[in-house]
Amino acid sequence: SYELTQPPSVSVSPGQTARIPCSGDALPKKVAFWYQQKSGQAPVLVIYKDTERPSGIPERFSGSSSGTTVTLTISGVQAEDEADYYCQSVDTSGTYSVFGGGTKLTVL
Amino acid sequence: QVQLEESGGGVVQPGKSLRVSCAASGFTFSSYTMHWVRQAPGKGLESVAVIIYDGSLQYYADSVKGRFTISRDNSKNTVYLQMNSLRSEDTALYYCAAEVAAGPDFYFEIWGRGTLVTVSS
């Protein structure tokens, strides 16, 4: 079955750049999406189709793709960015969504 | 405004049944494929079930196949998840989410706040 792999945690100091990778064998052929989930809240889409940013999402959030890895980058991290981040893609049948295990971003 | 609101969660004994609902408002519900996504306490997101816009096709994760049934009533702008033969590992916050197509792929633009299902004796 299709799997997406993320590191369990990433820590950065305020103002630094956080990079959260997500790897999966099908990612060269599939696009990825990123969600931010703050404690006690529903997920919120922050990046779609690897690199696109929805309206209302700060410019410090960006996405990139290279081979089997997609990366969420948060430039100039702020305390309010502390959250869990999930990558998501779709299986090869186009039917099921697949989520990475999530990465907890800690702002030191 | 655009909204999904889940209801019907609660505490249920192992082996019993429960039906959760998700009411949509603020968008054309009948045009959207809908998903149930769950999150066990302290864990990640897991897709559980999918139903296409007119209800004619449903898909399930292997972990719930044969036990859960997804359905919808477009006249009521509501999607349901009937959960039978519940197990302790089904304990989770259950979200409904509306799918947005991105070519052959899709993502979730609209999420509810979730309803908590606890399976415990």
Image (cartoon, coloured by chain):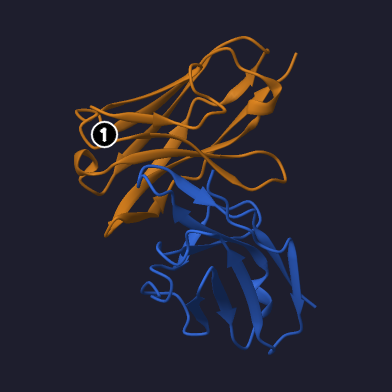
Chain colours: A blue, B orange
Q: Residue B45 at what x, y percent from top left? A: 58, 46
Q: Is residue B83 left or right of residue A19?
A: left
Determine crowd level at label 1: few under 14, some 14-19, many 20+ residues with C-alpha closer than 10 A.
Answer: some
Image height of A74 relative to B75, above or below: below
Can residue B35 be spotted in the picture?
yes
Residue A46 in the image: x percent, y percent?
Answer: 47, 69
Element carrying mark 1: loop
Q: Look at the image and tell me whether residue B1 can be seen.
A: no
Tell me the residue at 50%/32% (across/down): B61
Write down the chain letter for disc 1.
B
Near-viewer residue (A101 or A80): A101
Return the residue nearer the eye: A34 or B96. A34
Residue A89 drawn above or below residue B58: below
Q: Quadrant of the N terminus of chain B?
A: bottom left
Which residue does the numbered mark 1 point to in the structure image?
B77
Horizontal arrangement in the rendering, residue A70 relative to residue B28 (left or right): right
Answer with left or right where residue A4 lies relative to residue B73.
Answer: right
Give B80 or A26, whichever is nearer the viewer.
A26
Query: Which residue is at a point 49% across and 22% down the rendered structure image?
Result: B65
Q: Residue at x 64, y 53 (%)?
A: A101
**Residue B53, image quadrant:** top left
Q: Identify the residue shown where x is 28% and y is 29%.
A: B57
Residue type of the residue flagged with mark 1: Asn
**x and y, in percent, of residue B59 in the image:** 38, 31
Q: Residue furthest right?
A: A108
Q: Considering only vertical position in the picture, is B113 above or below B60?
A: below
Looking at the rendered image, the quarter that the C terminus of chain B falls into is: top right
How far across and how far down the image is residue A70, in percent? 53, 71
Q: Quadrant of residue B24?
A: top left
